[in-house]
Image (tube, rainbow, N blue to C red):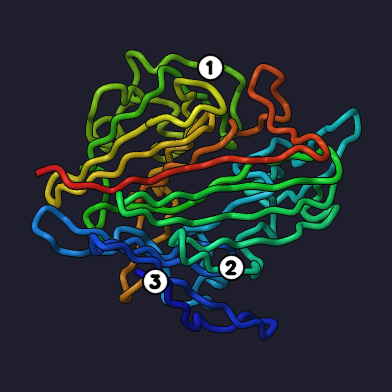
Amino acid sequence: MGINKNDFGMTRDGKEAFIYTLANKNGMSAEVTDYGATLVAVSTPDKNGRLDDVLLGYEDVTDYIENGGYLGATVGRNCNRVKGAQVSINGQVFELDKNENGNDLHSGFHGYDSFIWDAQIIQEENAVMFSRMSPDGEQGFPGNFKVSVKYTLTEENELKIQYSGKCDQDTIANMTNHSYFNLAGQDAGEITGHILQLEADAYLPVDEESIPTGEIREVAGTPFDFREPKAIGRDMGADDEQLRLAHGYDHNFLLRGGCMEVRKIAEVMEPESGRTMEVYTDCPGIQLYTGNFLENTQIGKEGVVYGPHHGFCMETQFYPDTPHHDEFPSSILKAGEEYSSITIYKFGIRV
């Protein structure tokens, strides 16, 4: 269908940002920008053929710079939290930014979401690939990390996000996408009525600072059991310490199938529109976040005010604070080896 490129505003240091629109023959489209390799919009039909944008986001690059929230952002070099903002690699300790309660969140004050990436349009694949060189010491991580993120929109209504990279030193590589979805439309309010099924038998409890305690807890008999479809908000108000600590769901689930195998790990359905979203990945974990700390001050597309629980995130990744837990799958990337990961969001309709 062709890929369109348009202006998306200027950064504070005078760099021009662009937005790229991918479309398929089914009427679905996705918009991505080179600022932060960010997913800006996903428009897909409902059961009546109505197109709605189902992704929370902003109007231009200035809003992404000033309002934050990681809406649609590519997060790297390491996503989620690291206790004490330090990692040890081969016996050497590396200090990271302490940008949340003395811990490191999403790689600190200047994560990958805050840079302009080089962009390459790949018309024959209906894809845009963003690339950058993350230099040695950036965010505190060792090694020169050449990294890319490719967004592809298929005729099967799949939005594929593929990460790849290589580093000249042993480092941490654990990237994700931080999109907030609302399948009723980005202006539709709370997502608590969305129906979620998640292929996970266990999750990671957290402490008061949202750092995993190290316990692996079975979901059976808890509000975290999504093995059978249920409304996201059904148990959100339960008398559960973990839900109180996070003000909702902000927890990593241990996915069936382990690492390196691409498989379907989740499906979400919004009853009124009939829209569905299946999630596929080769990652071992997924962070379910229900937008608990959207502030009612973030003005999104079309002037919409985003508040708590107005979007949900399905962030595929290694487990949070993995460098401090030998029993977790390792996120260390060896020098010269290829980092590769994929997430697929497939959109459909259930009548």
In 3D space, how far apart are the residues under numbered discs 2 and 1 (Cα atoms)?
41 Å
Q: Which residue is mark 1?
A: 216
Tell me the quarter of the picture where residue 101 sits: top right
Q: Amino acid at mark 1?
A: Ile
* Figure check: 223 above or below 3: above
Q: Earlier in the sequence, mark 3 or mark 1?
A: 3
Q: Which residue is mark 2?
A: 120
Residue found farthest to the right: 92
Q: Earlier in the sequence, mark 2 or mark 1?
A: 2
Do residues under tags 3 and 1 come within 8 Å of each other at their CB atoms?
A: no
Along the line of sight, the residue nearer the viewer: 295 or 109: 109
Q: Position of residue 154 (x, y in %)?
A: 36, 53
Which residue is found at the position 53% from the left and 77% from the top?
Answer: 18
Do residues under tags 2 and 1 come within 8 Å of each other at their CB atoms?
A: no
Q: Position of residue 301 (x, y in %)?
A: 35, 72
Q: What is the quadrant of the C terminus in the image?
A: top left
Element assignment for label 2: strand
In 3D space, how far apart are the residues under numbered discs 3 and 1 (Cα atoms)?
46 Å
Do residues under tags 3 and 2 come within 8 Å of each other at their CB atoms?
A: no
User: Disc 3 or disc 1, which is closer to the eye?
Assistant: 3
In 3D space, how far apart are the residues under numbered discs 3 and 2 (Cα atoms)?
14 Å
Q: Is residue 229 in sight in this rendering?
A: yes
Q: Which residue is mark 3?
A: 2
Q: Amino acid at mark 3?
A: Gly
Tell me the quarter of the picture where residue 249 sits: top left
Q: Which mark is residue 89?
A: none
